[in-house]
Every structure is written in structure tokens, then in C-alpha cells.
Amino acid sequence: MDVERVNAAIIYYSATGTVHALASAAAEGAEKAGAQVRLRRVAELAPAEVIKGNPAWEQHLQDTADVAVAGLDDLEWADVVLFGTPTRFGNPASPLRAFIEATGGLWGEGKLADKVYSAFTASNTAHGGQESTLLALGNTFYHWGGIIVPPGYTDPIQFTSGNPYGTSHVSGGGAPDAVALEAARFQARRAVDTAALLKAGRAA
Ligand SMILES: Cc1cc2nc3c(=O)[nH]c(=O)nc-3n(C[C@H](O)[C@H](O)[C@H](O)COP(=O)(O)O)c2cc1C
């Protein structure tokens, strides 16, 4: 059976680069799994003077100026969407929420249903709210009628990285290490593989 390639959108927010690194690894994993990939950052909402007060934030914004900003067309295009966000007081960051809250039209037309969704995050501390952040994003996937594909413990890397809800990095210890990056690649691969099965099944 000749089935079209899976379209994978990696849509993330990152202020200081941690989640961007995970998103880039997820994009690699999705590509390696055979998907066509769009890596997209959501629009920054913080005022320029606030960003200026944090050199790492300002630098990261400059460094990723060439990453395309996510649009609703990216969601419509995708068979599988991986969302990435830092934990902010135990929840997804507001720029990602703002993007999600602009999807009412697509949702109303049923265009967000039946896609594969998965999510990844980073927090400063180990118990700083990674799981609550991922579960909060999951609430939206339920509303959309999405097919949630978490990594679980379905690959050896998961027993090292340790979060079955979605790739999660503790940034207090530094930038994402080889384990976190491999977990992100694996998570994307699993989501793409699932979307490919669904696509083939629907085409048959
Ligand atoms: C407003 C704000 C709230 C945050 N809340 C939490 C939190 O609840 N728990 C935690 O461990 N880290 C928290 N952090 C830290 C970030 O989640 C963490 O530094 C993350 O790795 C940043 O990702 P980024 O580099 O992609 O922006 C918070 C950071 C900010 C700016």
C-alpha cells in the first residue's frame, strides 16, 4: 500500500532555549520516522522591555528569529502535532495557550479531531510541575477529540528519562542532555508511527 507521508507539526514556546532544544530533537525524530516536518514557535507575547531584562531570553529570541511562527494552517496541515512548553507555575506557558485559544474556528469545523497529539516540557526543578503541565495540555486534546500518544515506558530510553507523560527536562541542571534529546526523538517517532498507521488505515 502506498500511503502519503505523515505531516508532523512541532509547535513550541521557549523563552530561554530549553524547550527549543527538545523541539529540535523532536523534529529530528519525526523526520527520521519519515514524516514531513514543520518546526514552529508560537508568537512571543512578552513586552520587549521585559525580555530585555533577561539576556538569555533576548539572546534566544534573536537566535530563533528564523524559526517560522506557528499558524492555524500548520495545525490544519498536520496529521500529528507535538506541543512543547516550559512549565510556568505548573502550567503551560501563556504564549502557547494563546495560540491554542485561537483554534476555536478549526475546532468548530471538526478539523482538530482525529489527529495524534503528544507534548513535552521542561521545568527548573524535578518536582516543579512537569506532569501537571503535560496533563493540562491533555485537557485540550480531549476537547479536540485528539488521539493522545504518550511515550509511556515503550522504549528503553523511557526507563532512563523517566516520564511516561511526555519528554521532560529539568533545566536547573543545565541544557537538555543526551537522554532528554533521545527521549524527545523517541516520543516524536512513536507519535509519527502511530499517525502513519492511522493514515494507512483510513486510506485502505
Ligand atoms: C514565570 C515562570 C514560571 C515558572 N514556573 C516554574 C514552575 O512552576 N516550576 C519549575 O520547576 N520551573 C518553573 N519555571 C522555570 C522554567 O519552567 C524552566 O526554566 C524552563 O526550563 C524554561 O524553558 P525555556 O528555556 O524553554 O524557556 C518558571 C519560569 C518562569 C519564567
Image (tube, helix red, strand yellow):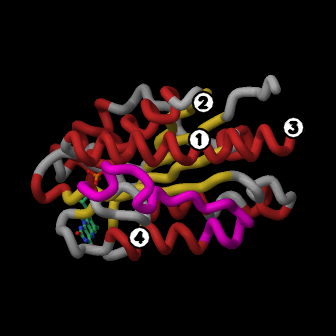
- Which one is in front in this view, the residue at disc 2 or the one at disc 3? 3
Which is more toward the observer, 108 or 161?
161
- Which one is in front in this view, the residue at disc 4 or the one at disc 2? 2
3 or 1: tag closer to the N-terminus: 1
Disc assigned to residue 35 = 2
Q: Quadrant of ligand 1?
A: bottom left
Rendered position, 122 above or below 38: below
Would you say 144 lies left or right of 45 here?
right
Determine the CA span between mark 4 and mark 1: 22 Å
Disc assigned to residue 203 = 3
- At x 52%, y 63%, the residue is 97
Asked if the residue at tag 2 contacts the one at tag 1, i.e. Cβ–Cβ closer than 8 Å, the answer is yes
Q: Secondary structure at mark 4?
A: helix
Determine the CA span between mark 4 and mark 2: 26 Å
Three-letter amino acid code at the position of disc 1: Val
Asked if the residue at tag 4 contacts the one at tag 3, i.e. Cβ–Cβ closer than 8 Å, the answer is no
- Which one is in front in this view, the residue at disc 3 or the one at disc 4? 3
Q: Secondary structure at mark 1?
A: helix
Q: Residue 35, image x and y in percent?
A: 60, 30
Residue 134: name its quadrant. bottom left
Residue named by callout 4? 133
Rendered position, 85 above or below 185: below
Three-letter amino acid code at the position of disc 3: Ala
Q: How many marks?
A: 4
Residue named by callout 1? 192
Magenta residues, as a range? 140-160
